[in-house]
Image (tube, helix red, strand yellow):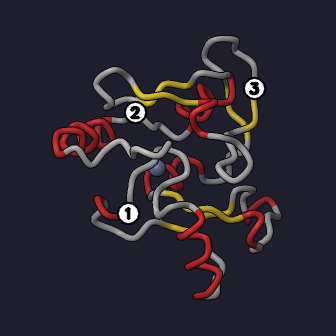
Amino acid sequence: MAKIKKELDQKIRQKAKNRCGYCLNPQELMPFKLEVEHIYPKALGGETVEENLWLACRECNGHKSKKVKATDSLSGKTFKLFNPRTQIWKEHFEFSQDKTEIIGKTPCGRATVDALQMNNIYQTTARLAWVETGKFPPKDI
Ligand SMILES: [Zn+2]
């Protein structure tokens, strides 16, 4: 990963409300530092500039990797992944009734949930514990 200046790193974290732009995992509940990621992957030529950076947890960033598109399970068609900087989370996703799973509401949302494995066992297990504490999901989405 490219070296990101401290000032820009802090700006991104603040703008992203210190949580993963995809699964909304909050920094305060994570045992590791959230990562400043390239929305359009650096490996594909994405630049290290504010407009192309956001915050992601290791799970989402790791599964996203170099992906920019994924398949919507409902239509079978390919869609661009969710862009946490330019798109609104609640327009594309919602939580299951028990708040442990993220459900894609749109083709983009479904493709992103699958590509980033946002409901893998590690994520849902953590959410279950967090929901019980009342600290998750974030109230301001
Ligand atoms: Zn995440």
Q: Is residue 41 above or below residue 6?
A: above
Quadrant the N terminus occupies: bottom right
Q: On the image, numbered disc 2 is attached to which residue?
A: 119
- Is the C-beta separation of discs 1 and 3 under 8 Å? no
Looking at the picture, which amino acid does disc 2 mark? Asn
* Of the image marks 1 and 3, the number of the one nearer the N terminus: 1
Looking at the picture, which amino acid does disc 1 mark? Gln
- Identify the residue shown where x is 45% and y is 48%: 24
* Of the image marks 2 and 3, the number of the one nearer the N terminus: 3
Left-right relation of 104 to 96: right
Left-right relation of 104 to 32: right
Q: Secondary structure at mark 2?
A: loop
Residue 78 numbered mark, or none: 3
Q: On the image, numbered disc 1 is attached to which residue?
A: 27
Looking at the picture, which amino acid does disc 3 mark? Thr
Q: Residues within 10 Å of mark 3 (few under 14, many from 20)?
A: some
Distance between the Cα atoms at labels 1 and 3? 31 Å
* Of the image marks 2 and 1, the number of the one nearer the N terminus: 1
Between circles 1 and 3, the one closer to the viewer is 1
Q: Nearer the viewer, residue 1 or 32?
A: 32
Q: Quadrant of residue 36?
A: bottom right
- Identify the residue shown where x is 38% and y is 23%: 96
Q: Nearer the viewer, residue 77 or 105?
A: 105
Q: Is mark 3 within 8 Å of ligand 1?
A: no
- Identify the residue shown where x is 25% and y is 44%: 126
- Is the C-beta separation of discs 2 and 3 under 8 Å? no
Distance between the Cα atoms at labels 2 and 1? 18 Å
Question: In the rendering, at what x and y percent does residue 130 appear?
Answer: 23, 45
Q: Nearer the viewer, residue 74 or 89?
A: 89
- Identify the residue shown where x is 59% and y is 21%: 105
Q: Secondary structure at mark 3?
A: strand
